[in-house]
Amino acid sequence: MIYLDHHASTPLAPEVIAVMGKAMQELFGNPGSVHAPGRAARAAVDQARRRVAALINSREREIVFTSGGTEASNLALRGAWRARRAGRNRIITSSVEHPAVLSACHALEADGAELVLVPVLPGGELDQNAFSDALDETVAVVSIMHANNETGVIFPVEELAKQARRCGAWMHVDAVQTGGRLPLDVNRLGVDLLSLSSHKIRGPKGAGALFVSREIDLQPITFGGKQEAGLRAGTENTLSIVGFGRAAELAREGLSSEPQRLAALRDGFEAQLLESLAGLRVHGALQERLPSVTNLGFDGIEGEAALLMLDMAGVCASSGSACASGSLEPSHVLLAMGYSAEQAHGSIRFSFGHGTRAEQLERVVELLIEKVPQLRALMLTI
Amino acid sequence: MLYLDHAATTPIDPEIRLGMMQRFESDFANPSSKHALGRKARQALESARARIAAVIGAQAAQILFTGGGTEALGMAVLGSAGDQAARIAISAVEHSAVSEAAYWLRERLGWQVDVLPVDEQGRVKLPELIAAVNAQTRIVAVMLVNNEVGSINDIAAIAGVLRRKCPRAKFVVDAVQAFAKMPVDVDALGADMVAFTSHKIHGPKGIGGLWVKRPTTLRPVFLGGGQEAGLRGGTQSVPLAWAFAEAAERQQNTDKTQPGHAERLFSLIQELVPEVQLVGCPFGSQRAPHILSLHLPGLPSGTLLNALDQAGVCCSAGSACTRSAKQNFSKVLSAMGRRPEEGAFLRFSMGRTTTDLEIEIAAQRFAQCVADLNEVF
C-alpha cells in the first residue's frame, strides 16, 4: 500500500500511539473532577496545551481544544459573528476555502451576514485587489486559509491580516493543513483566530484546536460546563488531546527538515511526470506551495477512473478534499481557478507525509506513465 | 485508590483499550476517502453505528456521532430551535449542557424558558408539567437518569402528556447516565431525540451520539464536509466509534441481576455511620443502580470530599462539569429542596469493574474520615 493522501488524514506516529496507550491506562479521570485522577487528567491536558501553543508560538491560555479542525473553524466564525460590534455585518472569505469554513459562512449569510467571497486568479493566488476592495469598517471577520488543502497554494495571510486589522476586523486563518507542516508564529502572522487539527499531523482524530488571541472576546457556540475557558463545553477528550500534544511536539521537531524533504520529493515527482507525460498540468505551480501536496490535471482522462486504477494498484490518492469526495461535483477550488468542469474532473491530488519515500513515488510515476495513455485511449473510445 | 466516581467518567475497558491501540494503527484513514483504506474506515464506522443503534432499538440512520454528550444535547436543543422565539421547557435538574443551551436561547433569541419543578426525590412532577407546557412550547428536555442523584424520570408518561398538550414540541431526552446501563428503547420512550455518551460506560472520551427520530428535521450546529447526514461536520474517528460500540455492547451485556453496588455501599455506610441519609428515590425501579447520593448532617461537603480524597477514595459533590462553579451549591439538590447548611452531600458512583471488596473498604474509609473530622468539627 502506498498512501499518498496525507491531506485527508495521516497515519499516527508510533510515539503518539505510545503516549495514548499510556494515557488510556493512567489518565482516565475527568479533567473537571477535583480528586487525584481528575487532577492528573487536567495536568495532561495542560501539558498538551503547552505543546500545541509552542507549535504556533502562542500563549498556553490562547489554545482552546475542540473536536477537530471543523469545529475550530465553526467556533471561530460563528463565535466571531456572535461577538461582532454594531454595524459590522460583513464577512470576507475566499472562494477556495475548506467546506468547514465555506459552509459556516453560508450559514451566517442565512443569519443576515453579508458574505463576500474573494476570488482567486488562474494561478491559484488570491485576488488581492478584490480582497482590499471588500475591506471596510463594516467587516466583522475575515477568514482566509493559510494554504489551500487541494493545491497547496499559500496565501499571504500576514499581509492580509494587517489589512483586516487596520479596518478593525478580526482575522481568522484556517491552518489545518499548515499547522505542523510549516513554521507558524501567530504573533508574526498577526491573526486573532487560527484553526489547527491533530489528524493531519500524525495525531489522532477527535482533537483540534483554535488559537484565540487574548485580545479578543470570542463567544462560544456550545453550552454546558465551563471547560476550555468557557469557550467549548463538554468533557475534554483527554486521550486525543494528549495524542495531539505529542504529535504537535513531533511536528515541531520535524519542521527544520521535513518541509525541505517533502518539497524535494514533490518537485522530483512533478518533474518526472512532466518529462514523460504530455497534457499534464500542475495546478498552482507558479505559486509558493505547501510542500506536502501536488494537484495534477491530466488532459483527456476521468480523475475517478485514474483513482480507481491507482486504488487497484494499491495507491491511495484523492480527487480533492476527502470531505467532499462523497459527491461527484467537480472541485470548487479548481473551478474557482478558472478550470473547466472537465479539467477539474481530470485532476488528482497526491499528498505526502512522514512515511512517504522516493521509491514509492517512483513506483507511482511508473504506474502513471504506463496507465495514463491507456486511460486516455479508453476515454476516446467511449 | 478507590475510584467511585463513574458518573463523572470511567476507565476504559482494558480489552477495548487494546482494540483501540490496534485501530489507531490500522484504521487511520478518513472515512470520506474513496480509496481502499477510506472504504475500510467507512465500513468500520457504519458497523459501529449499527451496533449502537441496536443497543437502543433504533435504526442506524437515526444515530449521529458527536464529540460527546454535551455536544449531542446542544445539537438537539439548538438544532430544534427555529427562527421564531417560542417556549422551551426543561426540568430543574437538567445537566448544564441542556440548561445553558436553553438560557442561551432566552438571552440571545428571546425564548421563554419554563423550568419544570421536581419533587424531593428529583423527579419531574407531572401536574406541574401539564400546567407548564402548551401549544407555544417547541422544545421539552427531561433527563432519563439524573447524573447527581440517580432518580429516573417516567419518560414515557411525560411523552404522553406532551403528545396531548404540545404535539409540535420536540422532546429531548438526556440518557447519558442511562445508556446501556438500563434497558432503553427509543420507541417505548416516545422521545424525538435521545443523547448518550461513551466515556460513562468504560469507553473513551471524545465521542457521543444523538438518536434523532427524524434527522431531516434537525438543523446543524457544526457545518463542514457533510459528514453525519450533513448535521455534524468533521472527520470521524474509527477507533473512537468502534470503542463506543464495543463499550455499549459490553455494558449492555453486563449481568444486571446482581444487587447494585450503590445499595450495598449505602447499607454498609449506614451501619457504620447511622446518621447518613439516602438522597433521592429509594433503591428500586425509580433509581439508577450505579449512583449513590447521600447526605451527612453537620459536615461541609468540601471538607469531607477532601478527606476522602486524602484517604484514596474518589467521589464527588456534584457534576464534574460544574467544577469552576464549585463554590455554588448543586442546583439539582436545590431543586429538590435541600440547602447547603444541612451538611455534606456526596455522590458515589459505581462502574462495571467495581468490586465488593472496594465497596467494603470505601465504607470503612468513609466512616474513618467522618470520625476524624467529627473530632475537629
Image: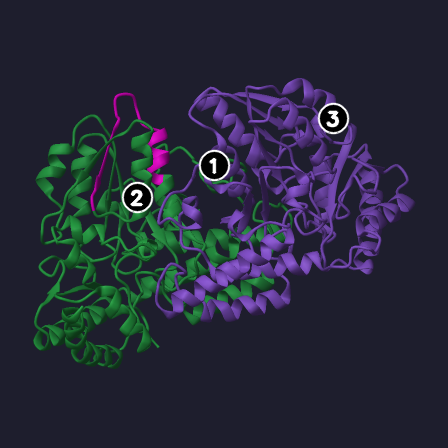
Structural crowding at the residue carrying mark 1, measured as other residues with C-alpha within 10 Å and reported as few (<14), some (14–19) or many (≥20)? few
Q: Position of residue A252 (x, y in %)?
A: 32, 62
Q: Is residue A6 magenta?
A: no
Task: Say which quarter of the image contains residue B334.
Answer: top right
Which residue is denoted by mark 2 in the rendering?
Answer: A101
Residue B217: assigned label: 1
Structural crowding at the residue carrying mark 2, measured as other residues with C-alpha within 10 Å and reported as few (<14), some (14–19) or many (≥20)? many
Q: Position of residue A227 (x, y in %)?
A: 51, 41
Q: Distance of mark 2 from mark 3, alpha carbons?
A: 47 Å
Which residue is denoted by mark 3 in the rendering?
Answer: B339
Letter of the chain shown green in the rendering: A
Closest to the observer, B98 or B167: B167
Image quadrant for the C terminus of chain B? top right
Q: Position of residue A28 (x, y in %)?
A: 60, 56
Taking the image as shown, residue B121 lies to the left or right of residue A4, namely right
* Residue in the image at 22% along x and 65% along y: A303
Answer above or below: position of A265 versus A216.
below
Chain of residue at mark 2: A
Structural crowding at the residue carrying mark 3, measured as other residues with C-alpha within 10 Å and reported as few (<14), some (14–19) or many (≥20)? some
Residue type for callout 2: Val
Q: Specify how the rendered protein is coloured.
A: by chain
Q: Position of residue B151 (x, y in %)?
A: 74, 37
